Amino acid sequence: MAKIKPAKGAPYARILGVGGYRPTRVVPNEVILERIDSSDEWIRSRSGIETRHWAGPEETVAAMAVEASGKAIADAGVDAAQIGAVIVSTVSHFSQTPAVATEIADKLGTDKAAAFDISAGCAGFGYGLTLAKGMVVEGSAEYVLVIGVERLSDLTDLDDRATAFLFGDGAGAVVVGPSEEPAIGPTVWGSEGDKAGTIKQTVPWDRFRVGDISQLPLDSQGNIKFPAITQEGQAVFRWAVFEMAKVAQQALDAAGVSPEELDVFIPHQANVRIIDSMVKTLKLPENVTVARDIRTTGNTSAASIPLAMERLLATGEAKSGDTALIIGFGAGLVYAATVVTLP
Amino acid sequence: MAATQEEIVAGLAEIVNEIAGIPVEDVQLDKSFTDDLDVDSLSMVEVVVAAEERFDVKIPDDDVKNLKTVGDAAEYILKHQS
């Protein structure tokens, strides 16, 4: 039996740089209210959302990802040619083949970097980060780009008063590379497929080829509606606040970091009420900076954590070297939490 | 020992006060959580989870929507507490 030589990886991995892209069009609640019977006060009190960004025709999934990634690569101080792998987490890129990651890797000027998409909903960034850490430590790539990017405005039912206001578009990216010290803790992650129905697409794509519109959702004029993301609000809220607080605590324990040692908390930006209740349930000390980027960004699924991270660093609310707890959770249901050192 | 209806209502009043800031004396059997007590659908989940812990009872998501009034909740807890 031949002896197989292993790759030579780094002792540890860290996030070296972060970048974000928010579409130029800012959409206030007033625009959402043109289609649903609700109020600005209701939307703010139920979600914390004041404005969100919606992508224009030129702001494609690939284009937004390239913008965010370019900033992350510059922030990391590496060259695009050094990127060995590109991982893209998205649920809103509508051409399944090929993966959008290859186009992004090419446009960034990587040197034939490995590139692939993953689907893990709002936990996608944590899933990608975990893969990237493994690749850097194992040695299959020295630098890995992890991108969360969504155009959820394309998957929003603007006539549904429970979700019309919720979603936004954007891209966030980080570069993960070698480190002499541990800077990404153990990931606590998992799935609960028995709750798959609580957040889902209204109809699967293959229904559209059957030709029988009786199985498809129609609007009031009888036109076929594009699929949208729908959720059972109360069930998701309960799971997110109370079950995810336990997962967040497990991630702190696994990393050996006490709440008192924590500087920043960056939960998935699903709803400000979920964030506030999680902070209360976790009993986080008051000096911990909590990301509430949702107010002006909406829920951008896989993009929300890197976007919030980028904004906290840009505004000075968080600084390089801070210890941050991140947790993503969503459709699947899936979740991923870990403690990281901010770039 | 299982709680009496009176104890349950007093416990719910404390929970609603803690979560929604409503004075405990306003939490009466005939009061609607959403219409009278300013407990919206998300706060209701927090009330339910706090009540589950306090009264050692499970209130599944499917049953939460049937708990319109304080009386509904008290009756449910009275019937299901272990």
Image (cartoon, helix red, strand yellow):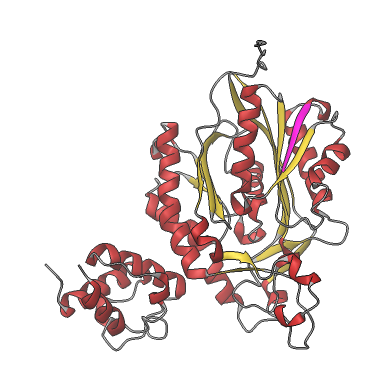
Q: Among all residues in the image, which is located at the extreme front?
A: A1
User: Is residue A87 on the magenta stretch?
Assistant: yes
Spot occupied by residue A279 in the image (x, y as percentages of width and height): 43, 52
Spot occupied by residue A110 in the image (x, y as percentages of width and height): 84, 31
Q: Residue at x 67, y 12 (%)?
A: A5
Instruction: Compare residues A338 and A314 and report the one nearer the observer.
Output: A338
Direction from residue B21 to residue A325 in the image, left or right: right
Spot occupied by residue A168 in the image (x, y as percentages of width and height): 69, 61
Compared with residue A184, is residue A249 higher up or lower down, i.e. above or below? Answer: below
Q: Residue at x 45, y 52 (%)?
A: A244
Q: Residue at x 83, y 55 (%)?
A: A60
User: Is residue A77 on the magenta stretch?
Assistant: no
Q: Quadrant of the C terminus of chain B?
A: bottom left
Q: Main secondary structure of the magenta part?
A: strand
Spot occupied by residue A30 in the image (x, y as percentages of width and height): 69, 76
Quadrant of the rendered structure where residue B69 is?
bottom left
Q: Is residue A48 visible?
A: no
Quadrant of the rendered structure where residue A310 is?
top right
The part of the chain drawn in magenta is: A83-88
Instruction: Compare residues B41 and A219 and report the one nearer the observer.
Output: A219
